Amino acid sequence: MGTIVLDTLRGEWALRRNVHPTGDQLIGDAAFASAGESALAYQESGILRLRDGRELSASRQYRYCAVGNRVAVQFADGPNTGNMFLNLEFSRKNWGFEATGTHFCGDDAYQAYYRILDSGSFETVIRVVGPRKAYELRSRYSRALRTTQDRLPSPMA
């Protein structure tokens, strides 16, 4: 099932993320591109609008690898590149797929929930709890209206 999930995720997405309780919001783009057999490279970029009105550029990269019914998510940028972030075991539902996973960072826990809808959208909720962190990232992805091919300049005649 892991490869079916990756096939569903492959492509470009519009991304909206809300951060609770701060009220910060990220609006941007995300893409899942082939990265070898049974793997996708995930890259997101956008503008993070803080509650006080400041805007910051933000980006993140992960590697998604299918392993049976599971999808292993590894960090693909920063000092933790190659380290495991999440191990998600997906199950089929009548509306799509869902999975949960937990990542521990010291005493803090990142509890992730993925819900991939057959309608061409998906969402993730990551709750971070612990002595040093307490917030929730709620991300909604919808298929991008334009594909990479649409963005390429047309060939000269």
Image (cartoon, rainbow, N blue to C red):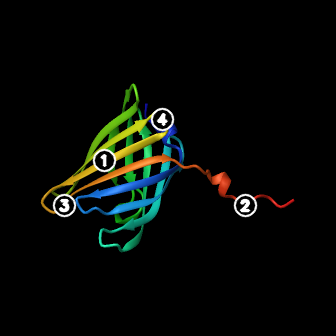
Residue under numbered circle 2: 153
Alpha carbon distance from label 2 to label 4: 30 Å
Residue under numbered circle 3: 133
Determine whether label 2 and label 4 are within 8 Å by CB: no
**Is residue 97 among the parts visible in the rendering?**
yes
* Amino acid residing under circle 1: Val
Q: Position of residue 120 (x, y in %)?
A: 49, 39
Alpha carbon distance from label 3 to label 2: 45 Å
Q: Please report whichever mark, 2 or 1, sits nearer to the chain's N-terminal start.
A: 1
* Amino acid residing under circle 4: Ser
Q: Please report whichever mark, 4 or 1, sits nearer to the chain's N-terminal start.
A: 4
Instruction: Please identify, in this view, whether the residue under mark 2 or under mark 4 is nearer the observer.
Output: 4
Residue under numbered circle 4: 119
Alpha carbon distance from label 2 to label 1: 36 Å
Q: Position of residue 107 (x, y in %)?
A: 15, 56
Q: Quadrant of the N terminus?
A: top left
**Is residue 35 among the parts visible in the rendering?**
no
At x 39% / y 25%, what residue is drawn?
Answer: 94
| Left or right of 50, for residue 147 | right
